Amino acid sequence: MPCLAQRPLYNWNSISLSGQLSKRWEIKAAHLRALDINNGFRPAFQQTSMQVSYEPIKRLAILGGALTTQSANRQTWRYYLRGTHTLRLGKTLQWSNSLQAEKHSANETRFDYRFIYITRLGLRKRIDFLRLAPSVSYWLYYNIGGNPIAHYNNSGQLIGRSTADGLHRYRVQFNLNSKINQYVSASVYYMLQNEFNLGSNELKYMNVKNPSTGNTARRFDNFHVAGISLALNLSIYNTK
């Protein structure tokens, strides 16, 4: 899955492998490497994840996993649990809603815990032309904990330190998948991430600047991702 993202411009490359353990159980492993294009394609960070999903009943799925992110100066861990319920909207659309809870390691200074609401709308059946399946999804993040952020008044005086708890991020992703044949499918996608302060008092804001210096102590960055992914489906072992 090669894609371009962020400013400065990064190149993300990932590979994943998933398999059915049984009719209701599935396991997946993935690895991603980010390269800094503006710095001679020097490695920026890498991520490795492992997750297991279980479908107790039709249209209800539960998954849990762990993800580690490593850069030149630190390594963080993330543990997560997600539940997803899928609804059929008539004969055309399919709508899924998920709630994900995350616990982050101490090296992640921005937050300790996160709760994420994910909603996705797509087609139940593919379009005849190129067997296309478009979809759109929206992610809303709620942060808890992390290192306290220094907050200042308009004169540059320190008025307090507090963790940036609250609704502070959303992601929107558009995806267009084509099933080329029974073994190969490809996707083109675009994702926008935006950081914001919603419903928070002044001592819960992110990206707070010191008016005296113009510096932000710890940045929460917006970014865009555009990419393409290729999936190969091989029935090595039939669990049915």
Image (cartoon, helix red, strand yellow):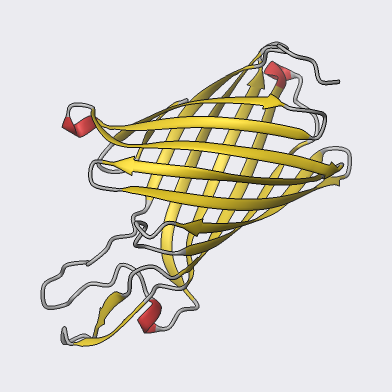
Image check: 57 left or right of 62? right
Q: Position of residue 204 (x, y in %)?
A: 40, 78
Of residue 234 and residue 176, the one placed in the foreground of this image is: 234
Which part of the image, by quadrant, shows the C terminus?
A: top right
Image check: 114 left or right of 176? left
Q: Residue placed at 27% from the left, 63% from the top?
A: 218
Residue ranking furthest to the left: 213
The part of the image, by quadrant, that contains residue 224 is: top left
Image check: 114 left or right of 20? left
Of residue 128 and residue 62, the one placed in the foreground of this image is: 62
Q: Position of residue 155 (x, y in %)?
A: 16, 87
In the rendered image, the vertical position of residue 133 relative to residue 195, given as above or below: above
Q: Residue placed at 51% from the left, 31% from the top?
A: 30
In the rendered image, the vertical position of residue 230 relative to residue 11, given as above or below: above
Of residue 193 and residue 20, the one placed in the foreground of this image is: 20
Q: Position of residue 27 (x, y in %)?
A: 65, 32
Q: Position of residue 145 (x, y in %)?
A: 43, 70
Q: Residue placed at 47% from the left, 25% from the top?
A: 1
In the rendered image, the vertical position of residue 69 relative to residue 3, given as above or below: below
